[in-house]
Amino acid sequence: MTDDKDVLRDVWFGRIPTCFTLYQDEITEREADPYYLLLPRISYLTLVTDKVKKHFQKVMRQEEVSEIWFEYEGTPLKWHYPIGLLFDLHASNTALPWSITVHFKNFPEKDLLHCHSKDVIEAHFMACIKEADALKHKSQVINEMQKKDHKQLWMGLQNDKFEQFWAINRKLMEYPPEDNGFRYIPFRIYQATTERPFIQKLFRPIASGGQLHTLGDLLKDVCPSAITTEGGDRRFLMHCTRCSVFPQNLSLR
């Protein structure tokens, strides 16, 4: 995978055209124009929307401004889910641009985690990397890295620098030839129609008989109802999060 640079680059630079509008009940000093942005699928809303926040704060009364949060058609958008995953879960059947509503009041405590700074995003980012490497390499690769390597991964994501990120990320994607693959495949299956956040299970890339497992094998083992459901089609959307540094995210609709 580390040699498929054109594919990796295409995944990295995937964008979603998005229109941000201010919630109609927010108190403003003048009318707020929409704000348009190309959102990177692999990043987080709270990491790439500083310009959106500044745009709408210009028309807001400062005493009315608190923590920003986003929703789509009444559903609060979880900032700790990658943007591409959020789109696939909630809006993949809609016309572009994706219409997101911006709020500065009435934070939905029961639905969203607070994100007061980019340090919170970085902590979540590193926790996901460590989780994935524990499954792939027993945490050996991430533990052998220096703190500056961790920081370079984070800065590569934050600044949208493909080369900077992949200079370190490639180490997390390698394995000894004799192993024929990772210990386990880090993945999560998200379903838009259930209250369960996601499905996650240990799954080896190679069967006991030596044959390579496929995506279909994984789904049959982890989520058989998705394969055998009668009376309707089921659609799978794969979101390649950080090119598999994180658990691979699949949304099921």
Image (cartoon, rainbow, N blue to C red):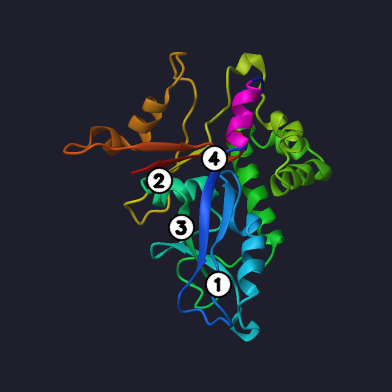
Q: What range of the chain is rendered magenta?
A: 4-12
Indicate which label's residue lies in the foreground, 1 or 3.
1
Q: Dot 3 corresponds to which residue?
A: 99
* Residue type of the residue flagged with mark 3: Ser
Q: Residue at x 65, y 74 (%)?
A: 58
Residue 15 relative to residue 167: left or right: left
Secondary element under disc 1, as helix, strand or loop, is: loop
Give whichever of discs 2 and 1 has the lower sequence position. 1
Q: Dot 1 corresponds to which residue?
A: 32
- Determine the CA span between mark 2 and mark 3: 12 Å
Give whichever of discs 1 and 3 has the lower sequence position. 1
* Residue type of the residue flagged with mark 4: Pro
Q: Dot 4 corresponds to which residue?
A: 247
* Residue type of the residue flagged with mark 2: Ser
Task: Kindly identify which numbered label has been placed on residue 91.
Answer: none
- Determine the CA span between mark 3 and mark 4: 27 Å
Q: Are marks 1 and 4 in contact (CB under 8 Å)?
A: no
Q: Position of residue 193 (x, y in %)?
A: 31, 52
Q: Nearer the viewer, residue 144 or 104?
A: 104
- Determine the CA span between mark 2 and mark 1: 27 Å
- Determine the CA span between mark 1 and mark 4: 38 Å
Q: Dot 2 corresponds to which residue?
A: 92
Give whichever of discs 3 and 4 has the lower sequence position. 3
Principal secondary structure, stretch drawn in magenta: helix
Q: Residue at x 51, y 45 (%)?
A: 84
Q: Residues within 10 Å of mark 1 (few under 14, many from 20)?
A: some
